[in-house]
Every structure is written in structure tokens, then in C-alpha cells.
Amino acid sequence: MALEINPKRLMSRIETMASFNATPGEGVTRFSYSAQDIKAREYLAGLFREAGLEAVTDGVGNIRARLAGASEDAPSVMSGSHIDSVLHGGMYDGIVGTLGALEAIQSIAESGERHRHPLEVIVFAEEEGSNFGSTLAGSKALVGAYSPSDLKKLKNPDGVSMYDMAKAAGYNPDEMPSRRLRPEKIKAMVELHIEQSVVLEARGVPVGIVEGIAGIKGLLIRLTGVANHAGATPMNLRQDPMAAAAQIISLVRTLAEGSGTGSAVATVGRISCSPNVPNIIPGEVTFSIDIRDVRQSGIDGVLDGLAAVAPAIAASFGVTLEIIPVSESAPVILDPGLTTLIENCAKDRGIDYIRMNSGAVHDSCMIAPLLPTGMIFVPSRGGRSHVPEEHTSPEEIAGGAALLADVLLELAR
Ligand SMILES: [Zn+2]
């Protein structure tokens, strides 16, 4: 059965949310614990009250707003996303999933449909890492991956910790261990989110059902040679790390393109060179490598290829090579049963969809290892996100929220 949602109400709320913004006219900037964040939370609190949801906020600012079910002992069905943004970001990232979840749950309440399980909107704090450079910090604190002492170590550029900022905003981060998400109390989590890429638009499909979220391996490559005169040093007597870097960067692309999984991607996005002078052969070149895949074997394939070939390239140029691991997160496979349920609801509603993977991380990555978790994507115009031009049409947002409502009701019956 297909539930009616109220697309006009949803869009007007999304527009109001965008008004809580530190950079009007230059995209949306709403960092966790800022004045704009506090205003957005006051607005949300009013919406939750109006919809009959009971909201509680934890020690870092994650909000859980609950609509009672026929059975109070039954585990709840949860949906939501984040409300913080990047600097000069868009108005849909996170918000579509947060207000979409509220719209879905409010519509279920208004439909009078009986549901045994309670329904919960979850609002995650500090997803983007805008304050402290650490993504998913709110959801990590919720699942216990960050302890209060970890929160003291996360600092913003002014040296203020997440712990102190949460405290100044009126929360009690010391409470987090006792407020941790209890998986046995949640039946399932479904997050609606904008795709932030071009796949749905290119395929002309309004909905993506996410099967997996890519893991990431971050590396730093340091090549050290001998800085010398660009004119006086013959080619055969050089130890030029830039020439070696060029071949290794090209190798990275070849390895990703040839990965056995067919889904690996690898990027060299930052390079630095010393002394960085036109008429001096560089002494040192360092660059980043970001490798992602929904299958660990794809990431490992690129890493293995790099380890096998890059040392020989470095040696052939007479330079030394260091491969330095910087960061790592494992791929996440979402619940296949939930993926099928979302698929069946899309079919029932006559919504065209594809199954796909996510190259971006989401709060659901932290929830998925603990309980059945699913994600629904709606298209991003031009694939653009984290920019002021970020756009998803009202029809696409309404379609995603309506599908979410069907899925949540099915789970909560
Ligand atoms: Zn997001």
C-alpha cells in the first residue's frame, strides 16, 4: 500500500532549515554547536512537538524523536540523517533525510495506520567533520566508537575540543557511555540521502537503493631524491623524484581501472614539491592517494599493485620511496533483506529504481554493523554536492520520502 505524504509541507520545511545559515547568498553553512545550529534545533523541536514525537538529545547533540507504537516494548524503527553542513555547502545534504524521515513518520501518524513498533527520527550531530576534521563524529559517539576522552582530543582550528563545544552548547558529553545506542532496541534503520554523484541522473532514474558504502584507504607517498641545478645536471646523473612521481601517479590510475572488482576508484588529489622552483630538480615530492571500493579486495588490489611496482619505479630514478598509511575505513555492506524490502516497496509504488553503491560515507556506516540498515538515494543535479549549487527537485525529494514512508510502515507494522 502507498502512503500519502505532504510534499508541500516537506519542501517548505527544507527551505526554512536553509534559512539557519551563517553565509546567506553563498551556500549553506551550518556547523554543529553554532548559533545557526541552535536555531535549527529550536525549529526542529517545534516540528517534533507538532507531529506528536517525543524528542531527547544526547550528550553530543544527536536527537532521537519518537512516535509511540501499539507495543511499547517492541524495538523501534529508525530513520534520519544529519543537520550540519560543510562551509558554503548545499541545502539538501543531510536535510532531505532528516526532514524526509519526519515527513514519513508524521504521515504515518496522520494516516491512522496501526503500527506495532515505535517510529523514531534520528538527527545526527557533526557528520561532516566541519568543526574537528573528523567525519561521523556524532554517530561515532552514539555507537561508542568515540569515548568522552576521545571527544576531548578532537579539536577545532582554535584548539577547542568537541567535548568542550558540546558542553558549551548545553550537552553533557560524559553521559554518552550510558546513552549509547542499544541495538536490541532498534529493529532497523533506513537513511534517505541525496546521491552526491551523477549515476542516478545519468541513468534517468529517480531512486537508488544502496547495497554497499565504499571503504577508504588514504596514503601518503614520499619520494626523496637530490635537489640540483636544472641546467648543469645531465639527465643520466639525476635523482629526480618528480619524474618518479609522474610514473607512480599514472600507475595508480591504471591499477584502479584494472581492479578485479570493477568498482575501485583511486585519486591523487594533493601533491607538494620541494623546493618547488622552476629551475631546480626537486629534492622531495609527496602526494596523497585516496583508494575506495565497496569491496575490500578492490582496495587491497590497488595497494598490492602499488607495493609490487612502485619500488622498482623509484629505484629506476635513483630515489627513495616511502608509502605511509594515513587513514582507513572498511567498506560497509547494507542489510540485503532491507534492500529487498525497499525494492519491493518501490515496485509497489511504481517508482523506477536501480541498486547501487555509495562512494561517500554516511552516518549509516556507523549503524550498519550493529543492526539492519538500508539507504535510499535521490538524484543530485549534475552530481554536485557540498556546493551552493547542490539541487534535487521537489518531485524527486517527495518520491524518496514517500518511498521511505512505505518502507518504515512496512517495518513498523
Ligand atoms: Zn550528508
Image (tube, rainbow, N blue to C red):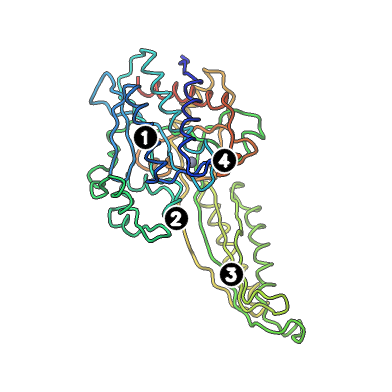
**Cα distance, mark 2 to mark 1?**
22 Å
Q: Secondary structure at mark 1?
A: strand
* Disc 4 to disc 2, C-alpha distance: 25 Å
Q: Is mark 4 within 8 Å of ligand 1?
A: no
Q: Earlier in the sequence, mark 3 or mark 2?
A: 2
383 with respect to 5 (left or right) = right
Task: Measure the alpha-carbon separation of dots 3 and 2.
Answer: 21 Å
Disc 2 packing (10 Å; few <14; some 14–19; many ≥20):
some
Q: Amino acid at mark 4?
A: Gly
Amino acid type, callout 1 = Ile
Q: Which residue is mark 4?
A: 25
Viewer-nearest of labels 4 and 2? 4
Residue 126 to residue 301: above or below: above
Establish whether ligand 1 lies closer than 8 Å to the Cβ of label 2.
Answer: no
Specify the farthest residue to the bottom. 232
The residue tagged 3 is: 286
At x 27%, y 39%, the residue is 182
